[in-house]
């Protein structure tokens, strides 16, 4: 019986390449579905990722003792995505408006004096995790005569099959 560390490690890693390939293929399919989905699904999932990213960023910063205006910034980031989708001409107004709101909150609602790191962290999160990525939504909206989803042609045979099966069911 071979119980050397090398043989035990080899046995333990036996299924890892297969799992890695399966995981990579699944992630590729998920991302491809997200990218080729319609503007509403793309914007919704992108907004969700942005909210999670902003909250993670602010949590890491808060562990250092800096407390940004995270709620205003997260709402501002979401509004930037939604405005980029539904009112692209007003999209540029979101960042200054929410910057004004956050500065108003810092000046009037805080009991302590606001520090420069708190202000800069708020603006960094709002700009890098809200404003810049929302331009991807605007780019997707160019040529808005595109169908709500680009996956409709792929799903059409499956949906037709389901419709036929549903029609064949007894009433």
Image (cartoon, rainbow, N blue to C red):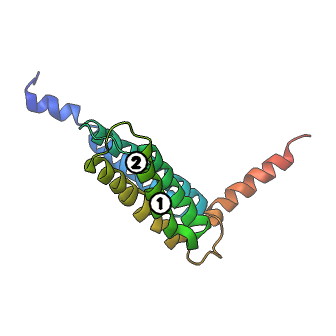
Sequence-wise first label, 2 or 1: 1
Check the picture and name the quadrant holding the N terminus: top left
On residue 32, which mark appears? 1
Give the farthest residue toward the top.
Answer: 1
Q: Quadrant of residue 151?
A: bottom right
Q: Relative to 84, say whether 55 is above or below.
A: above
**Most foreground residue, 44 or 2:** 44
Q: Relative to 139, say whether 149 is above or below.
A: above
Residue in the picture at 60% in, 68% down: 87
Residue 18, horizontal then vertical, whole percent: 32, 44
Give the farthest residue toward the right.
Answer: 171
Residue in the picture at 40% in, 43% down: 55
**Most foreground residue, 129 or 46:** 129
Residue identified by numbered label 2: 107
Residue in the picture at 47% in, 53% down: 101
On residue 8, which mark appears? none
Q: Is residue 79 shown left or right of residue 105?
A: right
**Most foreground residue, 109 or 132:** 109
- Foreground tag (2 vs 1): 2
Give the farthest residue toward the left.
Answer: 4
* Distance Cα–Cα, label 2 vs label 1: 45 Å
Q: Is residue 117 shown left or right of residue 58?
A: left
Residue 84, horizontal then vertical, whole percent: 54, 66
């Amino acid at each position: 019986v071979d119980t050397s560390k090398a043989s035990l490690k080899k046995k333990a890693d036996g299924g890892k390449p297969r799992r890695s390939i399966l995981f990579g293929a699944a992630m590729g399919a998920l991302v491809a579905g997200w990218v080729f989905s319609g503007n509403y699904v793309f914007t919704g999932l992108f907004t969700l990722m942005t909210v999670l990213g902003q909250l993670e960023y602010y949590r890491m910063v808060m562990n250092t003792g800096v407390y940004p205006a995270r709620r205003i910034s997260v709402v501002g980031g979401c509004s930037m995505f939604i405005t980029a989708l539904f009112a692209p001409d007003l999209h540029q107004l979101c960042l200054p408006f929410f910057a004004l709101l956050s500065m108003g909150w810092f000046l009037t609602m805080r009991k302590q004096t606001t520090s420069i790191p708190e202000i800069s962290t708020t603006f960094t999160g709002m700009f890098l995790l809200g404003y810049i990525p929302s331009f991807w939504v605007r780019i997707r909206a160019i040529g808005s005569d595109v169908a709500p989803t680009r996956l409709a042609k792929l799903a059409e045979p499956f949906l037709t099959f389901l419709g036929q099966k549903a029609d064949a069911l007894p009433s």
